[in-house]
Image (cartoon, rainbow, N blue to C red):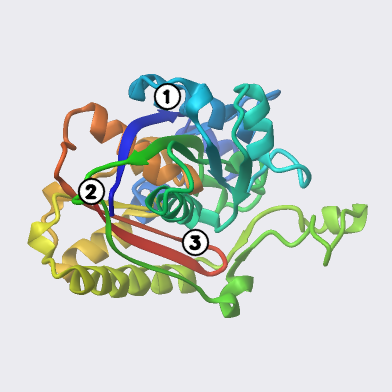
Amino acid sequence: MGVRIVGVGGYVPQLTVKNEDLTELGCDADWIVQRTGILERRHTPEGLATSDLAVEAAQRCIEDAGVDPNDIDLLLLGTFTADMPLPSAACLVQEKMNLKAPALDLSAACASFVFALWTGMQFVATGCNQLVLVVGADCNSRVLNPADKKTYPLFGDGAGAVLLAPGDSQQGLLSYAVGSDGSGADLLCRPMGGSQTVFTQEAADAGQHFMQMEGRPIFKWAVRIVEDTIYEVLEDAGEKIDNVDMFIFHQANMRIINATVKTMGINPDKVANNLERYGNTSSGSIPLVLDEFYRQGHIKRGDLLLLSGFGAGLTWATVLLRW
């Protein structure tokens, strides 16, 4: 508590890829809509990378907050698609924005932004930092196999950012449920590029540099973990579902979101989505929705927000936030 969001920003690249554009790859446009709810997504043009998306979102966030960038004293970037294995994408963002703050990546796949938000709020709450820039950004189009017709259409590229600063005693995180389960690591992974499977032509020919996902078990796990953690954070905070003003779920699949809404009796009017236009932007999905609905005037001071991210690891992070 005692932490507030003073600025919000989001960015998606201009290149729009509609479902119909993917038919030349053998993808079924109708299947994509029926199974995911996605109509189109954005892809990053050649010459740009994750750090470039993060910079755009961060700059818009800083403009929204009206602060001096020199006052930012910590930069946390949630991503799993850094520009390169070394150094961190956060350091590249720091250089491109001419910031003085220390910078580091947090990698928890599609839960990365909420992990970074949870971490940044603790730095502010303890007084270690006064102005923390938290960014979620991913360039999924660079790590997907176009021949994987069940996975390739699901993802898009995008970034979102928030600025954290000290607030009053009623603002910040009321409760959170954050966790990891490495026993599910092989369900969603990108095998090549680390110390276990180094870059080789043989591994590349086998597609080991692309993301690989077991869709069915991930779907079942995601529905269960989102529901369980929502109950957990509400009980811990002494709140009820009806008291939440807005739910922002990781934009992975509308069937996951709809199943959660139906099972838990959540008012659909309180659920913010933009999945149909951007697809699954991984670390960028939750802050992109947050930015969009904040700028539309749907979020105001004192509102109770529930954010829930989940992804490879397996990792999950559900937080209850007083705006």
Q: Is residue 323 shown left or right of residue 199?
A: left
Badge 1 is on which residue? 62
| Residue farthest left in this picture | 242
Amino acid type of the residue that numbered disc 3 sits on in the rendered structure:
Gly
* Residue at 53 percent of width and 76 percent of height: 181
Neighbourhood count class around disc 2 (C-alpha, 10 Å): few under 14, some 14–19, many 20 upward: many
Is 53 situated above or below 323? Answer: above
Q: Quadrant of the C terminus?
A: top left
Marks 1 and 3, how far apart in space?
A: 28 Å
**Of circles 1 and 3, which is in front?**
1
Neighbourhood count class around disc 1 (C-alpha, 10 Å): few under 14, some 14–19, many 20 upward: many
Q: Which label was assigned to residue 171?
A: 2
Of 45 and 205, nearer the camera is 45
Image position, residue 276 (x, y; %): 34, 40
Labels 1 and 2: the sequence-earlier one: 1
Image position, residue 18 (x, y; %): 45, 32
* Residue at 78 percent of width and 45 percent of height: 86
Amino acid type of the residue that numbered disc 1 sits on in the rendered structure:
Ile
Labels 1 and 3: the sequence-earlier one: 1
Inspect this view and state whether residue 297 appears. yes
Badge 3 is on which residue? 311
* Residue at 91 percent of width and 57 percent of height: 202
